[in-house]
Amino acid sequence: MAVYGAGQVKELTDLVPGILGQLGPDSLASLRKLAAQYQSQTAAAAAAAAAAAGANGAGGEAKGAQEEIITPEALKFLAALHRTFNATRLSLLDARHAVQRRLDSGGELGFLPETEHIRNDPSWTCAPPAPGLEDRRVEITGPTDRKMVVNALNSGAKTFMADFEDSNCPTWANMVNGQVNLRDAVRHQIDFELKGKQYKLVEKPATLIVRPRGWHLDEPRVLVDNQPMSGSIFDFALFFFHNAAYLLANGRGPYFYLPKMEHHLEARLWSDIFYFGQSYCGVPTGSIRATVLIETLPAAFQMDEILWELRAHSSGLNCGRWDYIFSFIKRRREDRNAVLPDRKDVTMEVGFMESYVKLLIKTCHRRKVAAMGGMSAQIPIKNNEKANEAAMAKVRADKLREVTAGHDGTWIAHPLIRKIAMDIFDEHMHGPNQYHVRREEVEVRAADLLSAKITGGKITEEGVRGNVEAALSYCAAWLSGNGCVPINHLMEDAATAEIARMQLWQWVYHGASLDTGKTITPEYIDAFIKSTAPGITKTIAGVNDKHVEIASRYLSEQVRKERASEFLTVDLMGYLEGGNGGFVSRRSML
Ligand SMILES: CC(=O)SCCNC(=O)CCNC(=O)[C@H](O)C(C)(C)COP(=O)(O)OP(=O)(O)OC[C@H]1O[C@@H](n2cnc3c(N)ncnc32)[C@H](O)[C@@H]1OP(=O)(O)O
Ligand SMILES: O=CC(=O)O
């Protein structure tokens, strides 16, 4: 069996000629020079850059408060970032193909020999915690609509991760209004009234952290030089441009969560963008903090390397468990040994998930940054006390597992879960973090991260039906503009829905059988699609028959494909306003 790894860094660096070398005086100076060149463009050039970076929402130009976000100066910054970094982004995305091809032909993931010196050097650490990030025991997450932003910031959680990724559907309105809402929240000018209820920001809200979209997503409504710009750069840059200086002047800073990376050179690209952005906007170098979600299988082998690349701006790593499971299945699509049982059986206690948690905690604490836990999918269940208590008991057990493992904080999906998580972390974590829990005894081998053995796990009819309900209902909701919904009393977002979609594909592709012996076929799945579809418009507000029809066709096609798509969000983007109708980007198919 071929092992990929040897020579990989060199090869990727060759594939990605735009990427700057390891941080050093030369690369820093060249970034600063570039930033200064773009910054010193005349007003006429700014207007031209703004025209080149034409922003076109569904309803045409940005309107009202949106115009205060999509300004000529902000567009000039977007254009400068695009021109400097987009080619590198595209090359890095292409490099993911090369990795996938090797895995498809029997290669295995492993720790990179080229970067062993980084992993084995105990002497380096990352940036110190920035103001507002010293204690992150409970972090609430959620999309950026105005009401949820106020509720999250007021929830009593230590931080709020405002999400442009998994829990957000990237309509133009959601993307730009989200930026308006965050700008207003930063300035404490967000109070409003809705249906007779006052939404008023508390004096000391949670610290704001922003999650831009992943590298794979374009922002198709903003073209620079006739190319769609990166969704990641769009989200990062608008937030940074409008808020970094204000935040720093008011005792906070520009803080980010970085999703879905697959290689440490992708982290280096973020690092380059941070240096460039700080220089361009005249913000002190090192003001940014970024926590990276380790939520792809390749990235789990490069935790130290990712921290190393971002060390001047790093605030830790997070166990993005749902995307991680999705990636585990997707990247090992040809591997029969990676066939997993029902989604509910893939818990944090199974071997490969436990190994990933241990490695993340050990790595972060060695480098003196936060090792953040993740999200339990259970949310409060209304009008059923017994079911609610059972769901909350699961959340409690999950948070207890995290704090005793050594995590420095955790995620919650809903304000009503804050107290449960806070009480457990308060009881078991006495200081602001647990960096002293070193876990040096932990030895995680590649085989530990790759073993899909799950004792007692089964594929059941209930598991198939549950996956169809989650994937289908979620896609329909997403098409209606909503990126996060409760389905069967669980929080479903892009990451959890992707597990459902990918498992259905995996089971069909590998001819897996149910515990009853029945083989899972596309026709068997179609029957569940048919029985689930009619109920969706009744259970999820805003979803119409057209959304359900597109989602049904999509899922039915996916389970018949030789290769399932890379991301449902890329596939379905063409159906959102401003998209071009069902178009599948070239990067959707690896
Ligand atoms: C895998 C990952 O990437 S995890 C990270 C991404 N996922 C998330 O962030 C999940 C965010 N959570 C949510 O979107 C929601 O909690 C849902 C969709 C799961 C459930 O939402 P709802 O059914 O509306 O919840 P519910 O009706 O109980 O809400 C009650 C109140 O709490 C508010 N609320 C619920 N969740 C949140 C949240 N995460 N942040 C802020 N406010 C929230 C609602 O806005 C509502 O406010 P109101 O009383 O002022 O109207
Ligand atoms: O983004 C978080 C995850 O669990 O996936």
Image: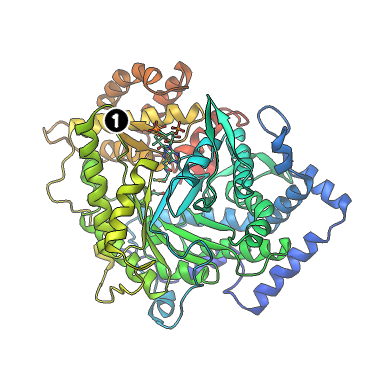
Compared to 585, does 548 lie above or below? Answer: above
**In the rendered image, is residue 414 in sight?**
no
At a point 53% along the width and 65% down the height, the residue shown is 131
Residue under pointer 1: 488
The image's colouring method is rainbow
Residue density around tag 1, few if under 14, some if 14–19, many if 20 or more, within 10 Å: few
Residue located 27% across and 21% down the image? 527
> What x and y, as percent, mark residue 59?
68, 27
**Residue 154: image location, x then y, percent:** 48, 45
Say whether residue 87 is left or right of residue 344. right
> Where residue 563 sits in the image (x, y, percent)?
39, 41
From the viewer's perspective, tell me whether residue 351 is left or right of residue 18.
left
Position of 219 compared to 362: left or right? Answer: right
Q: Secondary structure at mark 1?
A: loop
Q: Residue furthest front?
A: 203
Image point (59%, 44%), residue name:
218
Q: Position of residue 360 (x, y in %)?
A: 35, 65
Q: Which quarter of the rendered picture does the N terminus lie within?
A: bottom left
* Label total for image: 1
Q: 536 or 265, which lies in front?
A: 536
In this view, the residue in front, 378 or 198, is 198
For the residue pair 303 and 246, the one nearer the viewer reads as 246
Instruction: Please name whichever residue, 373 or 450, is drawn nearer the observer in this view of the structure.
Output: 373
**Quadrant in the picture for residue 400:** bottom left
What amino acid type should be assigned to the residue bearing mark 1?
Asn
User: Does any portion of residue 285 appear in the rendered image?
Assistant: yes
